[in-house]
C-alpha cells in the first residue's frame, strides 16, 4: 500500500526518524549518566535540568508551535509546587496523591484562565498572562498561613516507592528523567501530528483556518491546558525533590527565565528547548558567585537575542550556518 | 442546494450588497460576475461565515447558515479559495492540503501525543487523500516544497487542492483565473468542468468572460451590490443592463 507514495508516509509513527533516534539516544544517556557524572553535584544539577525542561517543553508547544505568547508558566509551576507541598506537608496526604490532585487543580485553573485570556492576541495575551503570574506571586506572599509566605514552605515529604522515599541523587535522577523523557516523547509526537500542524496553521493566521472547519479556540485552549500542566507537573516534582518551595518559584523572574531558555534554544524547537534548559541550568549554577549581575546579564542577553535572532539563538545560528553552507557549496 | 435570499450588507454606510437573491443547484457551475467593488467577495465572506449578514437568509442543503460560525459552515460541506491565495506560507504543500483534512480528523490531543495506532492510521489515510487531491488538480511539483516559494499560479492550485481535501459539496472560487495567461485559463476551465463532472457544485467569481461563458451553467451579475441579471450565458451576453454596466467599466467584456 505504501510502495506508491512518498518517503513521508513510510514513517510508521508521526514522529520523524531523526527525532526518534535522538530521543532513544537521550534515553541511553540518561541510563548511563550516573556512571558518567558520578554522584553529587553534576547529577544534582542534571535533576534540575529534568524539572525545568517540563515548563520549557510546554511553553515551546504553546508559543513556538501555536504562537500564543504566555508568561504564565512560572505561575503554573508555582501552583503545582505549592498545591503538592500544602496537600502533603500540611494536610498529610500521600505525596503521590498530592501530586495528582495538584495536577487536577492546575488543569481546572488552566481551563478557566485559558478560556478567559485566549480571546486576546499578541501583546494583550502576554500582558494578561503576566498579570496572572503577578497575582499568583502576590497570593503566595500574602497567604502566609497556607504558603509560609516569604519564608517559603518547608518539610515537604519526598515521593516514595514501596515505602522507601526516593531520596538519593541517583534514584531521583531516574525518576525525574523518566517523567521528562515521557513528556518529551509526548510533545514530539504531538508536534509532528495533525495537532502540531494545526497549531502551526493557527500561529500563521486564524482567518483561513476557521474556514477550513478547524476549531481554532478549542485547539488554543487544549494546548494551553496541556502546556500549563507540564509546568505544574514540573512544579510538583520540584516540591517533592527539593522538599522546600519559596515564592521565587512563582516569580516573574522565573517566568522570564523560561522564556530565555526558548530564546536560547529556538522557540519552535523542542530539542532546542532541551539544550536551552541544559545550558541555562548549568550556567545558573556557575553564576551563583556573581548572582547580583546575573539578572542584568540575562536581561541583556534576552534583548540581544530577540533583536538579532527572533526565532531563537541556536535556531538562528543553525539557519545562518545553513545559508553560509549553501553559498559555499 | 445553496439559497441566498435578500442578502444585504453595508460597511460604515457603504452598501456592499443590497437584497441579493439567487440559488445554486446541485451539480451546476454558477458564476458571479460584476465590476470591481460590486460586492462579489463580500458575498463569499457572508456565505462562508467570515462576515455576518445584516439582513437576509442563507441556507445550504436545507439548513440555515445564519448563526453558525465559520468552522461549522465549513463542516457542512462548503469550501472556498481566496482572491489572493491564502496558503500557510511557512508550511509545505502537503501540509497545507492536509489542513483541509484536519476538521474530519477524529484522533484527539492525547491519541496524537501518545502516537496511538489509530492516530497514525488516520494520518496515513489523510496523507493519501491529500496526495489524491493534489493529483486531482494536476499539481505536479514536489509536495514538500514550502508554500511561500511557489509561483502564484501553483499556489492557486494548491489552494484548490486544500479546499477539495475538506470533501466539500459546494466549492467557492474567488477569481481563480486572475493573472493566468490564455492557455493556463483554458486548463483551469478544464479542471472546473472535470470537478463538476465528479459531482461537485461550484460557485465561481470571475472577470474573464471567455472563461465564464465556457464553464458556467448560469450566471449572476452584480453591480454596485445589486443583482442586475441572472440567467444562462447566452442570455447574459445579450442582456442590455449587463452590457451597460460593463461598458461603463474598464474591466469590460472586451477582455476575452
Ligand atoms: N471588510 C470590509 N470593510 C469595509 N469595506 C469593505 C469590506 N469588504 C468590502 N468592502 C467594500 O465593499 C465593496 C465591495 O467589495 P468586494 O465585495 O470586495 O467587491 P468585489 O469582490 O466585487 O470586487 C467595496 O466598496 C469594498 O471597498
Ligand atoms: Mg473581490
Image: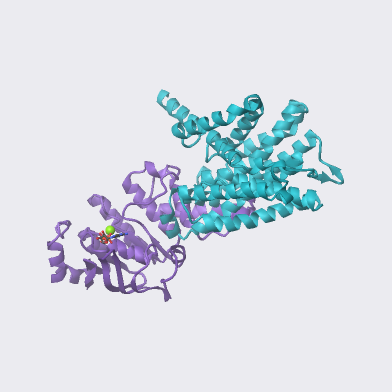
Q: Is residue B203 left or right of residue A257?
A: left
Quarter of the rendering containing residue B142: top left
- What is the residue that sits farthest to the top in this orientation? A328
Q: Quadrant of the N terminus of chain B?
A: bottom left
Q: Is residue A162 left or right of residue B74?
A: right
Q: Quadrant of the C terminus of chain B?
A: bottom left
Relative to B254, is A19 above or below? Answer: above
Q: For chain A, what colour was chosen?
A: cyan
Which residue shows up at 54% across the image and 52% down it? A194
Which residue shows up at 48% across the image and 52% down it? B98
Percent from the top left, x then y, of residue B72? 47, 66
Quarter of the rendering containing residue B199: bottom left
Q: For chain B, what colour was chosen?
A: purple
Percent from the top left, x then y, of residue B245? 15, 65
**Residue toward you, A275 or A30:** A275
Q: How is the image coloured?
A: by chain
The quadrant of the picture showing ligand 2 is bottom left
Q: Is residue A68 visible?
A: no
Amino acid at each position: 500500500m505504501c510502495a506508491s507514495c512518498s518517503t513521508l508516509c513510510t514513517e510508521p509513527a508521526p514522529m520523524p526518524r531523526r527525532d526518534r533516534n535522538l530521543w532513544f539516544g537521550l534515553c541511553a544517556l540518561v541510563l548511563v549518566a550516573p556512571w558518567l557524572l558520578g554522584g553529587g553535584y553534576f547529577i544534582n544539577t542534571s535533576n534540575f535540568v529534568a524539572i525545568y525542561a517540563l515548563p520549557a517543553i510546554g511553553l515551546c508547544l504553546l508559543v513556538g508551535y501555536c504562537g500564543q505568547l504566555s508568561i504564565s508558566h512560572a505561575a503554573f509551576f508555582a501552583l503545582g509546587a505549592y498545591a503538592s507541598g500544602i496537600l502533603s506537608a500540611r494536610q498529610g496526604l500521600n505525596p503521590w496523591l498530592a501530586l495528582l490532585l495538584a495536577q487536577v487543580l492546575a488543569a481546572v485553573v488552566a481551563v478557566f484562565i485559558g478560556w478567559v485570556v485566549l480571546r486576546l492576541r499578541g501583546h494583550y495575551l502576554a500582558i494578561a498572562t503576566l498579570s496572572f503570574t503577578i497575582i499568583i506571586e502576590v497570593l503566595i506572599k500574602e497567604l502566609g498561613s497556607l504558603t509560609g509566605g516569604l519564608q517559603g514552605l518547608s518539610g515537604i515529604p519526598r515521593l516514595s516507592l514501596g515505602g522507601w522515599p526516593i531520596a538519593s541523587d541517583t534514584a531521583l535522577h531516574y525518576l525525574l528523567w523518566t517523567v521528562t523523557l515521557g513528556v518529551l516523547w509526548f510533545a514530539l509526537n504531538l508536534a509532528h501530528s495533525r495537532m502540531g500542524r494545526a497549531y502551526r496553521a493557527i500561529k500563521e493566521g486564524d482567518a483561513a483556518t476557521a474556514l477550513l472547519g478547524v476549531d481554532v479556540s478549542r485547539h488554543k485552549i487544549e494546548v494551553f491546558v496541556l502546556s500549563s500542566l507540564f509546568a505544574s507537573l514540573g512544579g510538583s516534582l520540584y516540591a517533592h525533590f527539593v522538599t522546600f518551595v519559596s515564592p521565587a518559584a512563582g516569580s516573574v523572574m522565573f517566568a522570564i527565565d523560561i522564556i530565555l531558555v526558548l530564546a536560547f534554544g529556538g522557540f519552535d524547537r523542542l530539542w532546542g528547548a532541551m539544550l536551552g534548559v541544559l545550558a541555562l541550568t548549568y550556567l545558573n549554577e556557575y553564576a551563583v558567585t556573581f548572582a547580583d549581575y546575573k539578572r542584568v546579564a540575562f536581561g541583556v542577553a534576552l534583548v540581544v537575542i530577540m533583536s538579532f535572532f527572533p526565532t531563537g539563538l541556536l535556531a538562528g545560528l543553525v539557519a545562518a550556518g545553513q545559508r553560509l553552507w549553501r553559498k559555499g557549496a | 442546494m445553496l439559497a441566498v435570499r435578500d442578502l444585504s450588507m453595508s460597511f460604515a454606510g457603504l452598501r456592499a450588497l443590497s437584497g441579493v437573491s439567487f440559488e445554486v443547484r446541485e451539480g451546476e457551475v454558477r458564476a458571479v460576475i460584476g465590476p470591481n467593488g460590486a460586492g462579489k467577495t463580500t458575498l463569499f465572506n457572508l456565505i462562508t461565515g467570515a462576515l455576518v449578514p445584516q439582513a437576509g437568509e442563507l441556507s445550504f442543503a436545507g439548513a440555515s447558515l445564519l448563526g453558525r460560525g465559520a468552522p461549522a459552515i465549513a463542516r457542512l460541506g462548503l469550501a472556498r479559495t481566496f482572491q489572493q491565495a491564502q496558503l500557510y506560507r511557512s508550511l509545505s504543500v502537503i501540509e497545507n492540503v492536509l489542513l483541509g483534512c484536519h476538521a474530519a480528523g477524529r484522533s484527539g490531543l492525547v491519541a496524537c501525543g501518545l502516537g496511538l495506532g489509530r492516530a497514525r492510521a488516520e494520518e496515513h489515510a489523510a496523507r493519501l487523500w491529500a496526495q489524491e487531491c493534489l493529483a486531482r488538480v494536476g499539481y505536479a511539483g514536489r509536495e514538500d516544497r514550502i508554500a511561500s516559494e511557489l509561483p502564484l499560479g501553483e499556489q492557486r492550485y494548491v489552494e484548490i487542492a486544500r479546499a477539495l481535501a475538506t470533501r466539500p459539496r459546494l466549492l467557492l472560487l474567488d477569481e481563480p483565473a486572475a493573472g493566468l495567461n490564455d492557455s493556463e485559463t483554458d486548463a483551469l476551465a478544464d479542471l472546473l468542468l472535470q470537478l463538476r463532472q465528479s459531482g461537485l457544485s461550484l460557485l465561481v467569481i470571475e472577470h474573464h468572460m471567455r472563461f465564464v461563458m465556457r464553464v458556467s451553467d448560469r450566471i449572476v451579475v452584480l453591480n454596485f451590490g445589486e443583482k442586475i441579471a441572472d440567467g444562462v450565458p447566452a442570455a447574459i451576453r445579450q442582456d442590455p443592463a449587463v452590457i451597460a454596466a460593463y461598458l461603463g467599466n474598464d474591466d469590460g467584456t472586451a477582455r476575452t
